[in-house]
Amino acid sequence: MPARETDASGRMAKFKFNNKHDEARRRRNEISVELRKARKDDQMLKRRNLNEDDCDTLSPHGDMKSPPLTMTVDQVVAGMSSSEETIILQATQTCRKMLSREKCPPIDVMISKGIVPRCVEFLGYHHNAALQFESAWALTNVASGTSEQTHVVIKHGAVPKLIELLESPYPNVAEQAVWALGNIAGDGPGARDLVLSQGAMRLLVGLINPITPVSFARNIVWTISNLCRNKNPAPPFEIVKTALPTLKTLLSNADKDILADACWALSYLTDGPNEKIQAVLDCGVVPHLVALLASPEVGVLTPALRAVGNIVTGNDIQTDSIINASGIKYLCALLQHTRLNIVKEAAWTISNITAGNPEQIQHVIDAQVLPPLLHVLQSGDFKSQKEAAWAVTNMTSGGTVQQLALLVQLGVLIPFCNLLDAKDWKTVVVVLDGLTNILTAAEKMGEVERVAIMIEEAGGLDKLENLQHHENEQVYQKAVAMIDTFFAEGEAEDQRLEPGTVDGQLNLQAAAAPEGGFNF
């Protein structure tokens, strides 16, 4: 079945797929907005550094006393304009503390007073690492705000200086520069590409090694993931793919935050054409990604599942890489997860496997996926039901007669017919397609009347008749065609086209009946 984002009338003009399984798989276009909303909970785009308690120990010069927050904004601005670096440092640290307030930090006030260009200037004070640290922290928190606030930081030339600080001999200065760049990259494609164009990825990857402290590594990986993030446009792949060997190594890390952000990065890099998917596969991440589908940490499981789901939107060979790594058994378990979004993602992923060839569909059957999938179709939340319906209909489109017969034997018709009442017309179209496919297969076997009776007993015929009055043209045309072809009596029965020539005939893989016929 062609991809979801194509026009449905074009999709339904012809059922025969001629084994072009690669084009059957559904990418994320239609649901990308919804997924972007979900990501706000799963991974923060920007982060403010509120770690006031550790500010002195983080400072390169631990002997410096932290000034009390008794200065006014104007006093801070005056201090940052002083000619004495001791006063500049105290004022800048106070500025940073003000911007680190958890509630209502005075970002716009500080911007209006001109502190951003001063902080950017201080980034270049290589003789004063403490001042570099405090100014980088202040800029981090300005860049954690709105796009307008982040743009002020960019406009005053912070990016090249922050990238230069990635090579600072002081780890805390380098870490604060990483954090600031992560916030800037998280602002959107333009800011992201600016950071990438100035060589940040190579330096970030170089900061990760076996002795990198966990807190530092977390910030690095989060920033890398932001540099891989966003579409329209996607980041320059030639640059971001250089992170792949490091991301593979990070999938063996014990820290759940590092794991999660590494998986998010991989989910972004696999969300695209097959060439990008292949580059990710070539670096050898699949066994590690699939193993993470068993993670008890939802924060890790969610992006790992997202990445696996993106991989199976690729071609048959790419999909086979997930199957060969035993991915289907994990997906089967995830159909029974307590989190609705995990169930929906698992069903969507399975729908892209059932869009494949009969061998891939058989792997789904052999892994005992159909019973929990049909349970989701019957009892899941609507978003999950919709994905399960796609999984079933894709299976009816590319499966063998035996595989379709098994679907019917396992009871697909009742939950399928129930969805004919769905308010979402696109889901109704998917179900109508699947039912037509099943009836067409049954017709090949001379069992169409038995299947039609089963659909009628499931309440399907009454719903089909109601759909003849549906406001959506595709829905009512399909409903009329089904009734005329499979449920009409008398002369209509004689007018049925031969199985091989019905408009919309399935490309079924078997011409012979399953052994023992269609045993319902």
Image (cartoon, grey):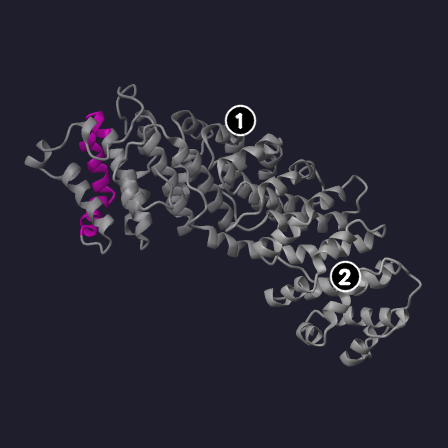
Q: Quadrant of the N terminus?
A: top left
Residue 297: give x, y in percent of width and height: 62, 46
Position above or below: 60 against 237: below
Q: Is residue 22 left or right of residue 421?
A: right
Is residue 453 magenta-colored? yes
Q: Amino acid at mark 1?
A: Asn
Q: What residue does disc 1 label?
A: 324
Q: Is residue 361 left or right of residue 147?
A: left
- Front tag of 1 and 2: 2
User: Could you say which quadrant of the image residue 283 lies in?
Assistant: top right
Is residue 384 magenta-colored? no
Q: Local crowd at mark 1 within 10 Å, few (<14), some, or many (≥20)?
A: few
Residue found at the far right of this picture: 63
Residue at x 32%, y 25% (from the top left corner): 402
Residue 108: give x, y in percent of width and height: 66, 74
User: Could you say which quadrant of the image residue 53 lies in?
Assistant: bottom right
User: Could you say which quadrant of the image residue 186 lies in?
Assistant: bottom right
Front residue of 517/83: it is: 83
Label 1, label 2: how many angstroms apart (C-alpha)? 47 Å
Magenta residues, start to end: 442-468
Quick one: SS at disc 1?
helix
Residue found at the far left of this picture: 491
Q: Amino acid at mark 2?
A: Ala
Q: What residue does disc 2 label?
A: 136
Residue 51: tell me if it is visible.
Answer: no
Marks 1/2 in contact by CB < 8 Å: the verdict is no
